[in-house]
Image (spheres, grey):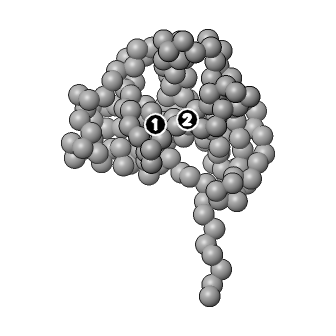
Amino acid sequence: MGAAAMTTIVDPTPAAESFQAALESGQIERDSLTQCKTDPGYFLHFDNAGGKPRLTFVQLDGTKVMAHLQAVVVEPIDGVPCFQIGYAVPVAYRKQGLALKIVEATIAELKNMAALAGGSAFYVEAIVGVDNEASNRVATKMLSSPMSITDKPSGSAAFRYEKKVDL
């Protein structure tokens, strides 16, 4: 019997590709997306993945996904709600600062949503593989300095970023 294959850190690119395919097939209708209140250049799709609420933020060029970010609720940090994010930009739209902008727009929209719900603060967290230079640059600019960790599901070296957002 061979050694078990090691899993890798979750890559958000397949989620962006799946979202694009769902838009193209009509499984997700463009008109069903909610325009973000804080920046109308971004749209929100809410669903449940495996029974957990999932917020998907996208920037679109017509029906083409230019930038994609998923936020899921994870364990609170010090009793404060936490959203874990993963973001991806299709190859055709890279090197334009779109990942940085969608993270910024998502935090602003989450802040607006939390304020409307009567919240006082939340955390945003990202787990990024040490070899993903582009995503690490974005997370360092938008969230915090990296904290070296071992990603629990994959056992891979990663960086963890977090930012507390007060309302």
Q: At 38% from the left edge and 48% from the top edge, which residue is drawn?
A: 17
Crowding at mark 1 (Cα within 10 Å: few <14, some 14-19, many 20+): some
Which residue matches tag 2? 73
Place of residue 20 in the rendered image (x, y in percent of width and height, measured from the top left) = 33, 44
Seen from the viewer's position, the closer of residues 83 and 142 is 83
Place of residue 38 in the rendered image (x, y in percent of width and height, measured from the top left) = 45, 14
Residue 3 seen in the current view: yes
Q: At 62% from the left edge and 14% from the top edge, which residue is drawn?
A: 120
Place of residue 103 in the rendered image (x, y in percent of width and height, measured from the top left) = 54, 28
Which badge, 2 or 1, comes first in the chain's sequence?
1
Which residue matches tag 1? 53
Total numbered badges shown on the rendered structure: 2
Q: At 62% from the left edge and 27% from the top edge, which residue is drawn?
A: 81
What label does residue 141 carry, if any?
none
Distance between the alpha carbons at the discs numbered 2 and 1: 7 Å
Amino acid type at image mark 1:
Pro
The answer to whether mark 2 and mark 1 are in CB contact below 8 A is yes
Q: Is residue 68 above or below residue 91?
A: above
Amino acid type at image mark 2:
Val
Disc 2 is placed on an element classified as strand
* Residue at the extreme left: 26
Residue 141 seen in the current view: no
Disc 1 is placed on an element classified as strand
